[in-house]
Image: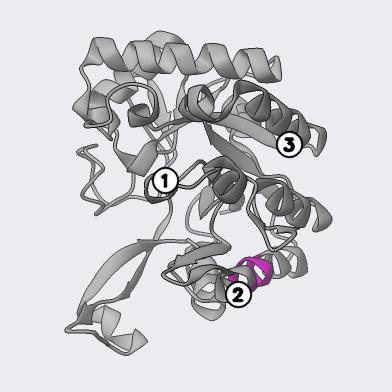
Amino acid sequence: MQTKVIITIDTEVRSRNRDLPDPFDRDVLGRLQGNNYGACWIADLIKNHGFTGVFFLDVHGCAKYGENRYRELCERLLNGGHSVQLHTHPDQMYDPQRRHMHEYSLAEQKAIIREGMVLLKDWTGKVPLAHRAGRYGANEDTLKALETNGIYLDSSFFYGRADCKLPFGNSNDPFKAHGVWEVPVTVAAEPITKLGFRFPFWTRLLWKRYQKLDVNCMDAKQLCRSVMEVYGKVPYLITFLHSFSFVQRRPTGFVTDDAAIEAFQSLLRLLAEKNIPVTTLDKIAGELVGNP
């Protein structure tokens, strides 16, 4: 089976940094010590390897951080050949006490998605074709709300994640539910950790959990190994990072996450060296749902 890789970047302000003077500057643009390590830098890294990425943009921060900044970011990403799709963190614009989509009614979710689509259409000139719920916090009503609004691709399902309330079994394969194609966040088995001790890698045959292919969750070696283990077994392989993946907040201040940068660069080199095809969700829409 030929596997196509989809590089996804959740582009957002993280909740614990909303106390900063300019969290958009830090978490979305990744500005640190005169350099940029955020969405635009990530976009350039991807493009320099001949690939395109899918930037899931949390539109609901625009009321706090300025709509023009989101518009400019969209233009920058689109000019680089990348895809911008809908990401929903409803607590940013709606109820701060309800952080996940599954905490909202079907009617509320329909409105949240509809309003997000209007914003993205205004900024990009395009209707979004795909969605991911913030913190993977979707439920079946989320899929129903997407279908009602004409979005037929979702990538919120994360097997084993407590925040994710989609009641489906362990599968990295795409599947259809409530009229929407779900392209799961790809997971790989990894050893469990007990009392601070991480068991050797081979022990995942006996005791394991599932982890997404995330530059902040796996080092370079494990990430590349996990990609190759899944490669050839599924039609689409989803890799993951955030716009803020390369900037760490510590008690003494912010620093670059050099291990995450190395993991991402190693992943891009692996894909290039092995000529693994990289695509975007809007490009596979025709394959799955018949929409261009």
Give the tally of numbered discs: 3
Q: Residue furthest left?
A: 195
Query: How far across and down, in percent of the image, does residue 228 sit?
Result: 55, 69
Left or right, 79 with respect to 33, comes to right
Query: How far across and down, in percent of the image, does residue 260 sit?
Result: 56, 69
Which marked residue is nearer to the observer: mark 2 or mark 3? Answer: 2
Tell me the SS state at disc 1. Answer: loop
Queried whether the magenta region covers residue 265, the answer comes back as yes
Q: Quadrant of residue 120?
A: top right
Queried whether the magenta region covers residue 10, the answer comes back as no
Residue drawn at (44%, 39%) of the image: 183
- Residues at marks 3 and 1, CA–CA distance in whole angstroms: 27 Å
Query: How far across and down, in percent of the image, does residue 182 sit?
Result: 40, 34
Residue drawn at (56%, 54%) of the image: 1
* Location of mark 1 (residue): 19
Quarter of the figure that contains the C terminus? top right
* Location of mark 2 (residue): 258
Numbered circle sitting on residue 77:
3
Main SS category, magenta section: helix
Left or right, 197 with respect to 247, comes to left
| Mark 2 surroundings within 10 Å by alpha-carbon count, few (fewer than 14), some (14 through 19), many (20 or more) | few
Tell me the SS state at disc 3. Answer: helix
| Mark 1 surroundings within 10 Å by alpha-carbon count, few (fewer than 14), some (14 through 19), many (20 or more) | few
Q: In the picture shown, does residue 266 fall above or below 71?
A: below
- Residues at marks 2 and 3, CA–CA distance in whole angstroms: 24 Å
Query: How far across and down, in percent of the image, does residue 184 sit?
Result: 40, 44
Q: Earlier in the sequence, mark 2 or mark 3?
A: 3
What is the span of residues highlighted in magenta in the rendered image?
262-267
